[in-house]
Image (tube, rainbow, N blue to C red):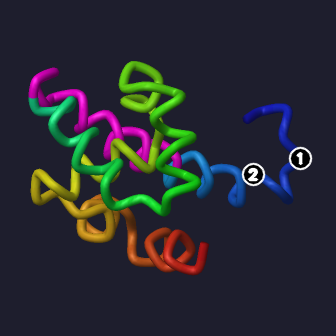
Amino acid sequence: MNQCPLADREFHATLFRIGNVSFKYHQQAYNTSDKMLKAYYDEWLEGLPSNIKESMKKHGFERCKSMLPFTRYVNERNDTGMDKWMKERLSEEDYQIWKSG
């Protein structure tokens, strides 16, 4: 961060804060047992459009279990919504920046 131009530091600091909270959110999925992750994977596949579903099947469970759309699905399935998670952990200003995406 010290090498970042002074004018850009707050912007990058905001991105780091949002990124860190988002990273922690997605990491929550790994608190789910492998048995449940596999069940959620099968369930998740069923809700995908057919072309994406086939692609994710080819990737397989092991690869997909670290993909952000899947980890978000797992967290939502475990009643940990990303919107609420981010709102509770970010400042109001950072949260609005995240929401505007």
- Name the secondary structure under disc 2: helix
Q: Which residues are magenta?
A: 19-35
Q: Classify 50 as above or below 97.
A: above
Quadrant location, the N terminus: top right
In the image, 35 versus 31, the foreground residue is 35
Residue 5, numbered circle: 1
- Name the secondary structure under disc 1: loop
Quadrant location, the C terminus: bottom right
Residue to which mark 2 is pinned:
9
Q: Are marks 1 and 2 in contact (CB under 8 Å)?
A: yes
Residue 64 in the figure: left or right of residue 37: right
Q: Classify 15 as above or below 2.
A: below
Residue 75 in the figure: left or right of residue 86: left
Residue 2 in magenta? no
Q: Quadrant of residue 37?
A: top left
Q: Position of residue 60 (x, y in %)?
A: 44, 25
Residue at 29% x, 59% y is 89
Q: Position of residue 100 (x, y in %)?
A: 58, 80
Q: Position of residue 53 (x, y in %)?
A: 47, 49
Q: Main secondary structure of the magenta part?
A: helix
Kind of residue at badge 2: Arg
Residue at 47% x, 23% y is 63
Q: Classify 35 as above or below 3.
A: above
Query: Callout 1 environment at 10 Å: few (<14), some (14 to 19), or many (20+)?
Result: few
Residue at 20% x, 30% y is 38
Residues at marks 1 and 2, CA–CA distance in whole angstroms = 6 Å
Kind of residue at badge 1: Pro
